[in-house]
Image (spheres, rainbow, N blue to C red):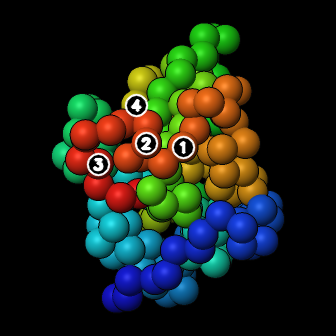
Amino acid sequence: MAIREVLKMGDPRLLAVADPVDAAGTPELERLLTDMHDTMRHLNGAGLAAPQIGVGLRVVIFGFEQNPRYPAAEDVPFTVLINPKLTPLGEGLVDGWEGCLSVPGMRGLVPRYRQLRYTGIGADGAAIDRIVGDFHARVVQHEVDHLDGILYPRRIRDLTQFGFNDALFPGQVLVDD
């Protein structure tokens, strides 16, 4: 339907906690999901949360087969996840480089749970219950953080590992986040 503007870090709407979705399958939700999908694909995103386009609802989408922003990442199945809940499996955290469409041109080394279970509902209202690991788990955690008003720089433990792509990775061509 429409490619929406992605809010940038500093916009107070990105700091708000999103509200639960009351009902799946509504025309309004379908329009939102279409706009989110079109926006994410247009920007080569790995995922997108509704608050990133100014909609304060607990809705995320994510997934790709190949993504120029994360060329070494494994495929992640396209998923619509409404009212998600995350349960870490184990205490193991692993550091990984993250970028964000709301923090363009920058990356940071972020600790995330290696494995987790996520539950919620899909676009059709059907229950989703998955156990995932590695990059898939990282993407889900990143997107769900947006629903709680958290941008990835707040998760970085060592700010020497946060900066502009061209300074952190000189000589490498990274697609802008």
Query: How far is the residue under mark 4 from the one under mark 3?
Result: 18 Å
Circle 3 sits on which residue? 174
**Residue type at numbered disc 1:** Gly
**Residue type at numbered disc 4:** Phe
Circle 1 sits on which residue? 163
Q: Earlier in the sequence, mark 3 or mark 1?
A: 1
Give the number of the disc on residue 89. none
- Image coordinates of residue 137 in percent, x first then y, are 48, 32
Q: Are marks 2 and 3 in contact (CB under 8 Å)?
A: no
Kindly identify the residue that appears in the image at 80 percent across and 65 percent down.
Answer: 16
Q: Nearer the viewer, residue 87 or 142?
A: 142
Question: Is 79 displayed left or right of 83 in the figure?
Answer: left
Q: Against 167, is 13 above or below?
A: below
Q: Against 129, is 117 above or below?
A: above
Circle 2 sits on which residue? 167
Q: Are marks 2 and 1 in contact (CB under 8 Å)?
A: yes
Q: Earlier in the sequence, mark 4 or mark 1?
A: 4
Query: How far is the residue under mark 2 from the one under mark 1?
Result: 7 Å
Kindly identify the residue that appears in the image at 33 percent across and 75 percent down.
Answer: 38
Discs 4/3, front? 3
Q: Earlier in the sequence, mark 2 or mark 3?
A: 2
Q: Against 41, is 28 above or below?
A: below
Kindly identify the residue that appears in the image at 43 percent across and 42 percent down.
Answer: 167
